[in-house]
């Protein structure tokens, strides 16, 4: 099995970007260790704080965010960072080449039940036309990403990442502390009838989305034999889609704050759409390509349909 750095070098990734990826993964390896310790490390449970999203923060949310924030701001290549847990961007080295956004612990509601959780990250080149402490650094469409990935903390800690080439999968070797290539190329299987969606939101969906799921559940023979899988962690659901096909869906709904979707464009939808597209799948928001959306804010929300091309196309065509 090949180590991460030689694979990146063979892919022609620039040395400074490789070093930054190493920095991100150093924090992720520490998060992986803290997650594996669980109750033994006293990191389970909720804090008394809420983040900018109005969500109660888990202790591991705060810890993971601080680990990533500290290690990235100590890297001279980083001009600015943005996080789900930070109200605004945080500036680093004014001359840094890159900006990094991340969801430090996606699916953190699963922490206390030992469920799937993960860290999502994305890297862009810094803009020279705006200050380093400006949110506008991140107002770039997802097609400008130079790297995107996630580390999934499960039975093993797995890194799934692309730098613009194939989406590859690595597994953390706890013996030596490095990520080893375990799947050279991930491609989304096109023939699958698996759905990842929270059906309890049905009552809040638009009529067209309700009709689509009525068809899936009761009417169409095309969906006979379909199955529903829902992890309550986008990173875990997308990992299954990358490996087994199907579609991940999170439509906008009528609940306050979710009228334009629930998932954040910058550090959830964009990096995962980049990974899925490089694995020959699709990522859309209201039928439009996610990676072409011009962001309006760092915490902007979007609806998401992501996965096998056939499944995403069928959903979009029936929910216009």
Image: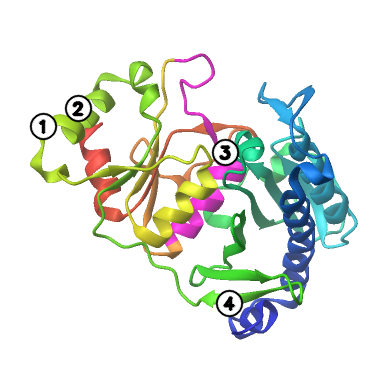
Q: How is the image coloured?
A: rainbow
Res. 219 mark: 1
Res. 181 mark: 4
The residues bearing labels 1 and 3 have C-alpha atoms spaced at a distance of 38 Å
Residue at (76% x, 72% y) in the render = 177
Does residue 66 sit above or below 96 in this rendering? Answer: above
* Residue 102 at x, y percent in the picture: 68, 47
For marks 2 and 1 on the same chain, the one whose residue lies earlier in the sequence = 2
**Relative side of 130 to 143, left or right:** right
Q: Nearer the viewer, residue 86 or 239?
A: 239
For marks 3 and 2 on the same chain, the one whose residue lies earlier in the sequence = 2
The residues bearing labels 2 and 1 have C-alpha atoms spaced at a distance of 7 Å
For the residues labelled 1 and 3, say whether their Cβ atoms are less than 8 Å apart: no
For marks 1 and 3 on the same chain, the one whose residue lies earlier in the sequence = 1
Q: Nearer the viewer, residue 213 or 77?
A: 213
For the residues labelled 3 and 2, say whether their Cβ atoms are less than 8 Å apart: no
Range drawn in magenta = 255-277
Q: Which residue is mark 2?
A: 214
Query: Looking at the image, is mark 3 or mark 2 nearer the viewer?
Result: 2
For the residues labelled 4 and 2, say whether their Cβ atoms are less than 8 Å apart: no
Res. 295 mark: 3
The residues bearing labels 4 and 1 have C-alpha atoms spaced at a distance of 43 Å
């Amino acid at each position: 099995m090949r180590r991460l750095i030689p694979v990146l070098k063979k892919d022609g990734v620039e040395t400074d970007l490789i070093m930054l990826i190493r920095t991100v993964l150093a924090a992720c390896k520490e998060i992986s260790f803290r997650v594996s310790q669980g109750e033994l490390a006293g990191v389970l449970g909720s804090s008394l704080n809420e983040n900018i999203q109005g969500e109660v923060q888990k202790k591991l949310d705060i810890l993971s965010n601080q680990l990533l924030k500290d290690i990235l701001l100590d890297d001279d290549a980083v001009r600015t960072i943005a996080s789900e847990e930070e109200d605004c961007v945080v500036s680093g080295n004014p001359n840094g080449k890159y900006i990094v956004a991340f969801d430090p612990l996606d699916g953190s509601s699963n922490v206390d039940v030992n469920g799937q959780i993960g860290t999502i990250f994305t890297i862009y080149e810094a803009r020279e036309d705006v200050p380093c402490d400006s949110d506008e650094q991140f107002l770039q469409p997802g097609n400008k990403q130079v790297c995107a990935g996630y580390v999934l903390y499960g039975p093993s800690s797995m890194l799934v990442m692309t730098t613009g080439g194939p989406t590859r999968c690595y597994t953390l070797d706890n013996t030596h502390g490095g990520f080893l290539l375990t799947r050279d190329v991930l491609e989304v299987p096109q023939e699958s009838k698996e759905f990842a969606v929270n059906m309890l939101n049905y009552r809040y969906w638009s009529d067209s989305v309700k009709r689509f799921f009525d068809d899936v559940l009761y009417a169409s023979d095309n969906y006979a034999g379909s199955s529903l899988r829902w992890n309550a962690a986008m990173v875990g659901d997308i990992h299954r889609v990358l490996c087994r096909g199907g579609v991940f869906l999170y439509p906008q709904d009528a609940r306050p704050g979710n009228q334009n979707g629930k998932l954040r464009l910058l550090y959830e939808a964009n990096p995962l759409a980049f990974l899925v597209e490089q694995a020959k799948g699709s990522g859309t928001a209201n039928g439009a390509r996610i990676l072409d959306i011009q962001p309006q804010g760092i915490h902007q929300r979007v609806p998401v349909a992501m996965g096998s091309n056939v499944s995403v196309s069928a959903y979009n065509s029936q929910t216009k």
